Amino acid sequence: MIKTTSLSFETRKPSIKPQKKTVFLKEEISDFLKNLGQKRLDLKIELSSVVDKLKYGTRTIHGLEKGDVHFVQYPFNYFFSKKYAHYLGIDFPIHFNMQSFKRREQI
C-alpha cells in the first residue's frame, strides 16, 4: 500500500517597512551644484585653476556650476561632483547616493 501525504504551503505577505529616501530630487542636487560654483567664486579660485587641478574640461565645470545634474554621463557626474566638492573644501552630502545622479529613465 502506498501512503500519500498532502503538502500544504503557507503563503505569507511580506511585511512592508517604510523605506528611507534613497533617490533625491534633481532640484536638491542641482542647488548643491550651484552652491559649489558660488563657493568657487567666493574663494576667488579661477576656473583655469580648477581645470588644471582636477583635469575637468571647462564645459564640464560650467555645466556642473549651472546645476545641470547631467553635465556628464552617469556615474561620472556623481564622482565629479564629489571630487569637486572635496577640492573646494565642502562636505559632500552623505545622503546623496550614486543612484540620485541617474536619469529617471535609468532608475
Image: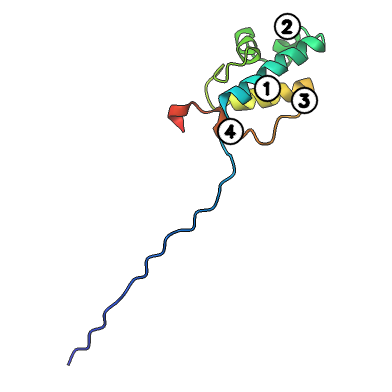
Q: Which residue is mark 4?
A: 98
- Disc 1 residue type? Phe
- Kindly identify the residue that appears in the image at 70 percent across and 32 percent down: 93
Q: Quadrant of the N terminus?
A: bottom left
Quadrant of the rendered image containing residue 90: top right
Query: Of tags 4 and 1, which is closer to the observer?
Result: 1
Q: Secondary structure at mark 3?
A: loop
- Disc 2 residue type? Ser
Quadrant of the rendered image containing residue 79: top right
Q: Which residue is mark 3?
A: 90
Instruction: Say whether disc 1 or disc 2 marks the residue closer to the N-terminus.
Output: 1
Q: Secondary structure at mark 4?
A: helix
Q: Which residue is mark 1?
A: 32
- Disc 3 residue type? Ile
Instruction: Say whether disc 2 or disc 4 marks the residue closer to the N-terminus.
Output: 2
- Kindly identify the residue that appears in the image at 54 percent across and 53 percent down: 17
CB under 8 Å between discs 1 and 2: no
Instruction: Say whether disc 3 or disc 4 marks the residue closer to the N-terminus.
Output: 3
Q: Which residue is mark 2?
A: 48
